[in-house]
Structure formats: C-alpha cells, structure tokens
Image (spheres, grey):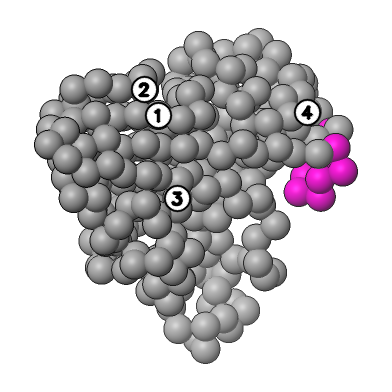
Amino acid sequence: MKNIFILLLTSLFLAGCFEVGVLVKVNRDGSGTVEQTILMNKALVQQMEELSESFGENNNKKFSLIDKKKLIKDAAEMGEGVYFMYTKPVSDKDREGYIAYYSFKDINKLKINQNPSDKAPLPSDGESKAPKEPVTFSFKTGKEPVLIIRQPDASFTPDSEFVDADEPQEAADDTSGMEMMMEMMKGLRVSIAAEVNGKILKTNAAFVDNNRITLMEMDFEKLIRDREKFKEISKQKPKSMEEAKKLFKDIPGIKFETEKEISIQFR
C-alpha cells in the first residue's frame, strides 16, 4: 500500500538533518521575492563531499550545496518573470547551507512547488518522480490589495511508483527501526509561508503571525517523539494532500493550512 504520509516521509528521509523553508514576500503592486532556505547537517555535507571525490563527480570539483545552474533552472520552473538573484551562505554549529533569493514581477505568474523533496541537494539518477504540487497565486491591486493563494489538489493512487510503504511501516512498528528513524529525523523541518508588505486587514488563513501566514510547517522531530501517535498516523492511508492536512491538523510540530483558497487583504 502507498500513502502520502509515507511518500513525504521517505522522500525526505535520506536527507537526514535537512531543513527547507520557502518564504514568498509580496509587495503592494504584486511584485516580490522568494527566499528559499536550505540547511543540512555538516557531517552529512562532509560525507557527500567525500562521496563525490571518491566517484570523481563534477570533474573532480569539490561538492557544493550551492548549484547556481539548478537555482537558475528552479527560477524558470517558478514561472514567467521569475529570476534568480543571489545566494547567502548560512552556517551555525551543526548545520550549513544557504538562502537563495529570487525576484518576480507578477505574482499571478508565480508557482511554488509544495513538494519539498525536490529541494534536497542530493545525488539523483535523473528527473525527480515526485509529483509537482504547485501553489498558485492571484493578485488584485488597489488601495487595499488582495492576495489569493490557491493550494493544489494533489492525489496519489495505489499504483504509485514512488515508494513501498511496507518497509517504512515495519520500521515504525519495530523498536530498532524507530530508534533509527528518530536519529535521522533530528532537525528535519519543512515550511512554506507568505508575507505581505503591509498590515493584514482580513484573512481566512489559520496560521497568522503579524504580516505572515504559514501554509505548511512540519517538524518531523517533534512528530516522532510521540511514538504511539506516530505509529497511529503511519497506519493511516490518506489519498490526497487535503486528507493528510486534516490528519495532521492538531499534532505538535505540524501546521497545515486546510483552506484550498486563502485570501489576504492588506494595506
């Protein structure tokens, strides 16, 4: 059996200690920026560097988390008029990575992939098989602009080839498997948010913090701390992102906006 929770979990599982955050900032004229934050455990980065050197990848060039060619390609996939600007390296005691900055002229043409697995800077054997789940936008200008965010209606069928859920389920039921998953999920976080350049006057968003609304925030480390709850969730078989969001609604460390269309009026 296949299900969306296992798909999302497994697609990020190999990244270990991986954090990705996407923040869309919108101006009053519908232009704005996208900030994409990528952080990975330093030990994992070192292992990837050693692996790259061992196999002679990239013409013996040292592995780097920042791949500008990919970032430029990512900009094109975000929509017409989206451009990659620059990156800012980020580092702390345990992690390193970067923030990539993109600009867009018209948010009506912007598309943000809701599936975070494509953001992991890991070796691959070609194009990702993970489904594209774009969040789209529309914008009404005026004295009090209105931003509309439309979430995708993603679905996953039983014959999906992405992952076999039996193995992760066995790991969730097995004590040693659970310990391994808990270790690998330390620091595993994903978030998508939008921020308007002004004061929010009216919105139907569930998670609002000043001028920012959160569409998705998943802290897998917090999720897996409650073993019984994690086992219960992993046994569920939601067939769509909407069902998954309802399943995770009241779980610590998990925020899922359940509205398909979020309206934000601001000034």
Tell me the amino acid under the disc marked 1: Ile
Q: Are discs 4 and 2 less than 8 Å apart at CB?
A: no
Q: Which residue is mark 4?
A: 169
Give the number of the mark in front: 3 or 1. 1
Q: Residue at x 70, y 13 (%)?
A: 232
Q: Are marks 1 and 4 in contact (CB under 8 Å)?
A: no
**Quarter of the figure that contains the C terminus:** top left
Disc 3 to disc 2, C-alpha distance:
18 Å
Tag 3 or tag 4, which sits nearer the N-term? 3
Residue highlighted by disc 1: 262
The amino acid pointed to by label 3 is: Ile
Q: Say what secondary structure mark 4 lies in.
A: helix
Over which residues does the magenta segment extend? 158-166
Using a 10 Å C-alpha cutoff, classify the residue at mark 3 as few (fewer than 14 neighbours), some (14 to 19) or many (20 or more). Answer: many
Q: Earlier in the sequence, mark 2 or mark 1?
A: 2
- Please report whichever mark, 1 or 4, sits nearer to the chain's N-terminal start: 4
Q: What's the amino acid at mark 4?
A: Gln
Q: Are marks 2 and 1 in contact (CB under 8 Å)?
A: yes
Front position among marks 4 and 2: 2
Q: Quadrant of residue 124?
A: bottom right
Residue at left offset 37%, top offset 52%: 108
Q: Quick check: 33 left or right of 115?
A: left
Image mark for residue 112: 3
| CB within 8 Å, label 3 to label 2 | no
Q: Which badge, 3 or 2, comes first in the chain's sequence?
A: 3
Q: Nearer the viewer, mark 1 or mark 4?
A: 1
The residue at which mark 2 appears reads as 205
Q: Quadrant of residue 217?
A: top left
